[in-house]
Image (tube, rainbow, N blue to C red):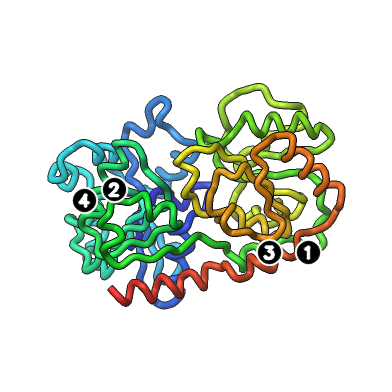
Amino acid sequence: MFASHTARTSPFRVGSHHLSRELARRGHSVVHVSTPLSPLRFVGSTGSSNLAQRWREHSISPWRVEENLVDIVPFTVVPVQGNGFLPRPVMTRTVFPGLRTTLAALDMADPDVLLVDEPLFAGLEDALAPRRLVYRPTDQYPGRLHGGAQGRLVSRADGVVATSEQVLRALPDRARQVPHVVLPNGVDLAHMSRAASGATRSGGVVYVGSMDDRFDHEWLAAVASLAPQVPFDLYGPQPPRRDRPANVRLCGALPYEDLPEVLTRYRVGLMPFRDVPENHGRSPMKMYEYLACGLFVVSTGAVRQVSAQGAPGVWDAPGAAAAARRISDLVATGTVNQAGADLAVDHGWAGITDRLETFLRSL
């Protein structure tokens, strides 16, 4: 069972979506649960662009995604964010009982392995009593809310699967005293192969993803201003209003199904992230998606794992002037990053799932 921070209704695909699918296709019975909806999520600024879709999915939960894979969007009156400060017995009695009832009806209330990648699910192990609890952190959590819940998970975990060395090092000491492994994110090669053959590349620059506080809006604006002849297309939920150069276009959220065809229209993929701890340990799924579609990649250098990878056709350019020059040169050449595409083949989710399955069987 996966307890994940992102629902399948999100425009983004995350590691738990890919891993749960791969394991199900190998014959394992898998359930994927995302953070519970609560009334607070529908009020004011706590809302999100896919809440209506998540509510529809909750209404038909459990949703059988494919054979052996069930998806659940729970609902609770007490927000799961309370796990950062409410006593564990309170959270266990108020947030998770409905989920256990749903799982019991599926004969899945006592999983062999509970993989948790959202710290606020701490305490779910008390409600379900899995045979093994595995914490799978995907980010660093410097704040009190997630940090406290993460500490409780690490204290009880039978194993840890971190998505980067930076994330592993940032965990409490016990995470390195129990069985642990680093499994970076990868790319859905079968999906990316759906890219339209012979697609005409516009020569422009693309970014696909969230444009929240981790996104470096100032860097992007400066780079685009210094390369006014290059179009910059940003795909993702609507970011905050701000002044942007005329060559920056907001294209809205992109369905994952359309990602390969859209990416193959461009020459360069951006990773415009701020140099903050929340970005340092991120795993470069986006980089491999860009590479699989033959894009060159220009990064601010904030994601340490991208820098450490040394992938062909990937450059760190924290300075706006250097980034603008590099992008202008790449667009002008009109070439495809074939070496990067070849590298991406070695980072598919099937191979990552092989390693995860071996690790889980060893616990």
Task: Give yes or no for contact between labels 1 and 4 (Cβ–Cβ under 8 Å).
Answer: no
Indicate which disc, 3 or 2, sits on the residue closer to the N terminus: 2
Q: CA distance from mark 3 to mark 2?
A: 38 Å
Residue at image point 64% right, 39% down:
318
Circles 1 and 3: CB atoms closer than 8 Å: no
Instruction: Name the residue located 48 percent from the left edge and 41 percent from the top edge.
Output: 50
Q: Is residue 71 left or right of residue 129?
A: right
CA neighbours of label 1 inside 10 A, class few (<14), some (14 to 19), many (20+): few
The kind of secondary structure element at disc 2 is helix
Query: Which quadrant, please, contains the N terminus?
Result: bottom left
- Amino acid type of disc 4? Gly
Q: Residue 150: which disc?
A: 2
User: In front: mark 2 or mark 4?
Assistant: 2
**Residue at figure coordinates x 39%, y 74% from the top left:** 357
State yes or no: discs 3 and 2 in contact (Cβ < 8 Å).
no
Measured Cα–Cα span from mark 2 to mark 4? 11 Å
Q: Which residue is mark 1?
A: 197
Please name the amino acid that badge 1 sits on.
Ser
Can residue 150 be spotted in the picture?
A: yes
Question: Mark 3 sits on what residue?
Answer: 194
Of badges 3 and 2, nearer the viewer stands 2
- The residues bearing labels 1 and 3 have C-alpha atoms spaced at a distance of 8 Å
Q: How far across and down, in percent of the image, does residue 92 sit? A: 17, 48
> Please, what secondary structure does the residue beneath circle 1 have?
loop
Q: Residues within 10 Å of mark 4 (few under 14, many from 20)?
A: many
Q: Which residue is mark 4?
A: 123
Which badge, 2 or 4, comes first in the chain's sequence?
A: 4
Q: Judge whether residue 60 can be spotted in this image.
A: no
Residue at the left extreme of this rendering: 89
First in sequence, mark 1 or 4: give its number: 4
Q: Residues within 10 Å of mark 3 (few under 14, many from 20)?
A: some
